[in-house]
Image: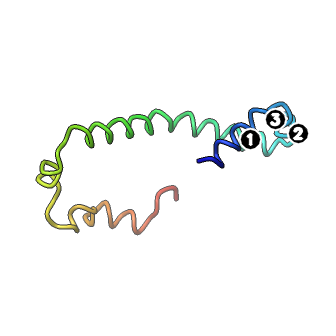
Amino acid sequence: MHVFGSLLVAALLFRHSLIGFVNSFPTLQTAATVFTGVFVQATPFLVLGVLISGAIAAFVSPRVLRAVQPRRESVAVGRGRGGRAGGRRPAGM
């Protein structure tokens, strides 16, 4: 975490130099634009997932979670049609 914080502070301090560097390479500029777009689109889902996970951890007892989960592991991990389809053709292809 300290490394990430240090990189973030360095990026903020040298942002004008970084902007000039990125703008001098069109390919890097495109990559930065795509990264920013994907990050902005994914952030609400990450926040929602964290909030739901935190609410489950805070308000649902382990006894209730055990009762809700399937008994057989093969059912829990999705070895049905969806699991086999993902094994045959990975996402993004």
Q: Which quarter of the picture shows residue 84?
A: bottom left
Q: Secondary structure at mark 3?
A: loop
Q: Which quarter of the picture shows residue 88?
A: bottom left
Percent x, y of residue 3: 66, 49
Mark nearer the N terminus (1 vs 3): 3
**Left/right of residue 56 with respect to residue 47 in the rendered view:** left
Mark nearer the N terminus (1 vs 2): 2
**Left/right of residue 45 with respect to residue 16 in the rendered view:** left
Amino acid on which disc 1 is placed:
Thr
Amino acid on which disc 3 is placed:
Phe
Label placed on residue 74: none
Distance from the alpha carbon under mark 1 to that under mark 2: 11 Å
Q: Secondary structure at mark 2?
A: loop
Residue found 22% across the figure and 68% down from its top: 74
Label placed on residue 24: 2
Q: Which quarter of the picture shows residue 58?
A: top left
Amino acid on which disc 2 is placed:
Ser
Q: Nearer the viewer, residue 53 or 83?
A: 53
Mark nearer the N terminus (2 vs 3): 3
Distance from the alpha carbon under mark 1 to that under mark 3: 20 Å
Q: Is residue 60 above or below residue 93?
A: above
Percent x, y of residue 38: 58, 40
Residue found 27% across the figure and 43% down from its top: 57
Disc 1 target residue? 30
Residue found 40% across the figure and 68% down from its top: 87
Verify CB contact (< 8 Å) between mark 1 and mark 2. no
Residue found 84% across the figure and 30% down from its top: 16
Of badges 2 and 3, the one in the foreground is 3
Of badges 1 and 3, the one in the foreground is 3
Disc 3 target residue? 14
Percent x, y of residue 78: 27, 62
